[in-house]
Amino acid sequence: MKSILIFLLVLILGTLTYGFYIKEPGNNQGEIIIGITVLVIAFVFMPLFIYHRYKNKNIKDFTFEKYQKDLAAHNKKEENR
């Protein structure tokens, strides 16, 4: 998965660079390429990246409830001193 993400990132950066390179004031082809590249970033690359980063993580570790419990335990510990 990591190699797919790296390949996709290089491909996206290359396409984005190409779009800016051929962009001219009278020609819309560069803007179309840039727009499609941005859509690929938003709807293909980012979901794959997020899935790759969080596939083996416990989502409850990232919620506010865990922080509240840890804060309450810390406060109780401070009161007992």
Image (spheres, helix red, strand yellow):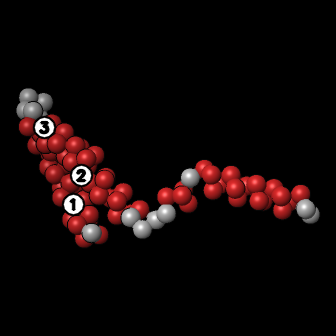
Q: CA distance from mark 1 to mark 2?
A: 9 Å
Q: Residue at x 21, y 48 (%)?
A: 40
**What's the amino acid at mark 3?**
Ile
For label 3, count other residues whose C-alpha is less than 10 Å away and answer few (under 14), some (14-19) or many (20+): few
Is disc 1 surrounded by few (<14), some (14 to 19) or many (20+) residues within 10 Å? some
- Residue that badge 3 annotates: 32
Residue in the image at 91% along x and 62% along y? 80
Q: Which mark is residue 8?
A: 1
- Say which residue label 2 marks: 44
The image quarter containing residue 55 is bottom left
- Where residue 45 appears, x then y in whole percent? 26, 54
Tell us which disc is closer to us: 3 or 1: 1
Earlier along the polypeptide chain: callout 1 or callout 2? Answer: 1
* Circle 2: residue type: Val
Is 25 or 45 nearer to us in this picture? 45
| Residue drawn at (12%, 30%) of the image | 25
Separation (CA) of disc 3 from disc 2 = 17 Å
Asked whether disc 1 touches disc 2, contact meaning CB atoms under 8 Å apart, the reply is yes
